[in-house]
Amino acid sequence: MSKKIRVGVVGAAGKMGREVCKVVSTAPDMELAIAVDRNEGLSVSEWAPGCEGLVTVAKLGETIEAAHPVDVIVDFTHPKFAASNALVAIRRGAAAVIGTSGLSPQDLAALRSESEETGKAVLYMPNFAIGAVLMMKFAAEAARHFPECEIVEMHHDKKADAPSGTAIRTAEMIAQSRTRKPNKPATGIVKFEGARGGSVADTPVHSVRLPGLVAHQMVLFGGQGEVLTIRHDSLSRESFMPGVLLAIRKAPLMHGLTVGLEHLLD
């Protein structure tokens, strides 16, 4: 039998972290080795079957060293901490899979440099839902024919960053695919600041934050006499788990920084 992938989850007691612990603990080719969370001493078996005796700890670096080997660290924490957590992981021999969005270009540059130096992969995934990745790819294809478009992204009211990483990544992919610059709308009078949203790579992006939402995005393209809408809805956090498992399985075999789950689907 092949060696199991030993996985650590950072933010293990959070909503996404609990889901990741659960699917990792039940995957036949994986083992949940460590669970890191600012809330120490919680029994992981309360939300992840088969993890009796595993409790949450606060210090990532020391825990990786104590549990050696740890093959992959999965981070679902906060944009303030995700990049530094990934650096700690790869410096101690574990690949890093980052599901926390909102990392800055400076964060990504540091991760790219360190991952090349250590030889350990960093996978930064703005969205783990397979359908969301396909939505972004379809939007990039549509942008070749419809340069004028806007993005509306909708998330729960506890989301820390805006716009979402998915919206930013979608706008970047659209910009790369356009055959010409979009014409700017003739909106001469904006009565309230922000009414037209923000702009990412020449695409207006509107962020909605409401209780009851999970993760949703529409990309609206306008052409002469027609409108094309590409939409994806994640109705539960379970929608992200197939992508998380795919990233964990790929990470030990990769090198450098990879941005976007689409690169793992090809």
Image (tube, rainbow, N blue to C red):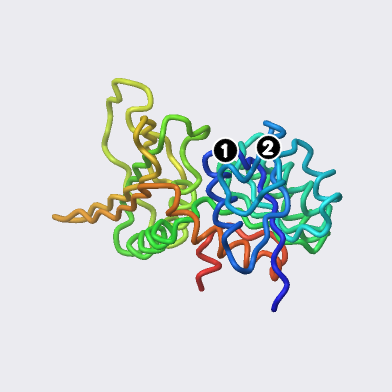
In this view, the residue in front, 70 or 101, is 70
Q: Name the spot of residue 234 as percent of width and height, x first.
A: 37, 49
**Front-most of residues 22 and 178:** 22
- x and y, in percent, of residue 71 in the image: 74, 61
Q: Which residue occupies the foreground of this view, 189 or 103?
A: 103
Residue beneath the point at 28% across and 29% down: 188
Q: Which residue appears farthest toward the left when viewing the image? A: 225
Q: Which amino acid does label 2 sit on?
A: Asp
Q: Please provide percent x and percent y for residue 196.
A: 33, 32
Q: Where is residue 178 in the image (x, y as percent from the top left)?
A: 40, 60
Q: In this view, does 187 lie above or below 28?
A: above
CB under 8 Å between callouts 2 and 1? Answer: yes
Q: Mark 2 points at which residue?
A: 37
Q: Residue 14 carries which label?
A: 1
Q: Is mark 2 on a helix, strand or loop?
A: loop
> Residue 23 versus residue 110: which sits nearer the camera?
23
| 41 lies above or below 68 | above
* SS at circle 1: loop
Who's the residue at 40% across and 44% down the image? 215
User: Looking at the rendering, in which quadrant would you find the N terminus?
Assistant: bottom right
Q: Is residue 38 left or right of residue 117?
A: left
Mark 1 belongs to which amino acid? Answer: Gly
Look at 36% across and 33% down and name the residue there. 208
Vertical relation: 60 (above or below) 80? below
Q: How crowded is mark 2: few (under 14 residues within 10 Å), some or many (20 or more)?
A: many
Tell me: 220 left or right of 43: left
| Mark nearer the N terminus (2 vs 1) | 1
Tell me how far mark 2 sits from mark 1, CA to CA: 8 Å
Q: In this view, does 223 lie to the left or right of 199?
A: left
Q: In this view, does 11 lie to the left or right of 115?
A: left
Q: Residues within 10 Å of mark 1 (few under 14, many from 20)?
A: some
